[in-house]
Structures are given as structure tokens and as C-alpha cells.
Amino acid sequence: MGIEVRYFEDIQIGDEITPLVKEIGIARMMAYGAATWDFIRLHYDADYARELGFEAPFVDGQMMGGFLTQQVQDWAGPGAFLRKLAFRNRVMAYPGDSLTCHGLVTDVSATDEGGMVECDLWMENQRGEKVVDPASALLRFPLRAGS
């Protein structure tokens, strides 16, 4: 059984992007730091974070971008290409938080390159606070043969 390709012709304005939930733990934060060679102590050392006046280590803001990227690529499928991602962090996320990525298709247009799809994205924590907002993505989708 192969992975299903999503085609531009199947996407409409108002379509919901499948939500993605991420549980935040210190191990995930440390793994992200190791994968990106970003070992800033504020993202894993609780004592150091408190010394600097923070309640706890907090999620690296770029990790949020990784979650949004995973969300749109999982939804879009293997034939799509993420052309642009923009986001603004609003609220800090900490170990123990549950983050949910949301999104909606806001525009579709056919081009010589394929079908271009614009999406509005946002991320909320378990308290309903918008951790990331606004955010947006531009994806290129394949056209069906003969379209």
C-alpha cells in the first residue's frame, strides 16, 4: 500500500488542515537541541532558567516552526512542497504543555509550477492560549495529469 498523494484539484478554500498535537517534555526539548546543535541552557536546565527569572526551561521558538512544518507536510502529502512558512511566537511553552497546531486553507491558485495553496495556521496550548499566531504557509501541490 503506497502513500496517498493529495492533488491541487481536491483542495478548496475553507478546508481544515488536520490538527497535530505535540506533548512537550524535557526529553523532546533536549532532543531538538541536539538535532539542531542548539544547546542553549534555557531550553533544558531548570536551575539555570530559574536563575535568570524564568519559571522553567521553555521551548525553543524554532521548534514551533518544526511542528507547523510537520503539520502541513503531513496533511499535504509527499507530492507537495512547502514553499514558505511564517509564524510569530506569542506565549512561551514549557515541559508538560500540550500544543495543538490548527490550520485552514485560505486561497488556492493554479500556476505554471502547479497548484499553490495558502493556509492560515495557529497553535494553542492546553489552556486555549494561542502560543503561535499569526502563522501562514504557502504550499505547491501537484496537478492531476490532464488537468
Image: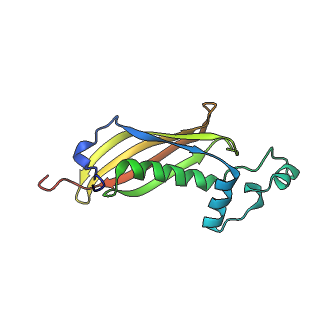
Q: Is residue 146 left or right of residue 17?
A: left
Q: State how many labels appear.
A: 0
Which residue occupies the extreme front position in the image?
1
Quadrant in the picture for the N terminus? bottom left
Q: Is residue 5 left or right of residue 131?
A: left
Q: Is residue 112 left or right of residue 146?
A: right
Depth check, front residue: 27 or 67: 27
Q: Is residue 104 visible?
A: no
Residue shown at 27%/47% (left/top)? Answer: 109
Colour scheme shown: rainbow
Residue shown at 76%/56% (left/top)? Answer: 42
Residue shown at 15%/56% (left/top)? Answer: 145
Which residue occupies the extreme top position in the image?
128
Which residue occupies the extreme bottom position in the image?
37
Q: In which image quadrant can residue 100 be found?
A: top right
| Residue 9 drawn at (x, y percent) | 22, 45
| Residue 53 drawn at (x, y percent) | 85, 47
| Residue 11 drawn at (x, y percent) | 28, 42
Residue shown at 53%/50% (left/top)? Answer: 67
Which residue occupies the extreme right position in the image?
51
Please tell me whether residue 140 is drawn above or below residue 133 in the rendered image: below
Q: Is residue 110 visible?
A: yes
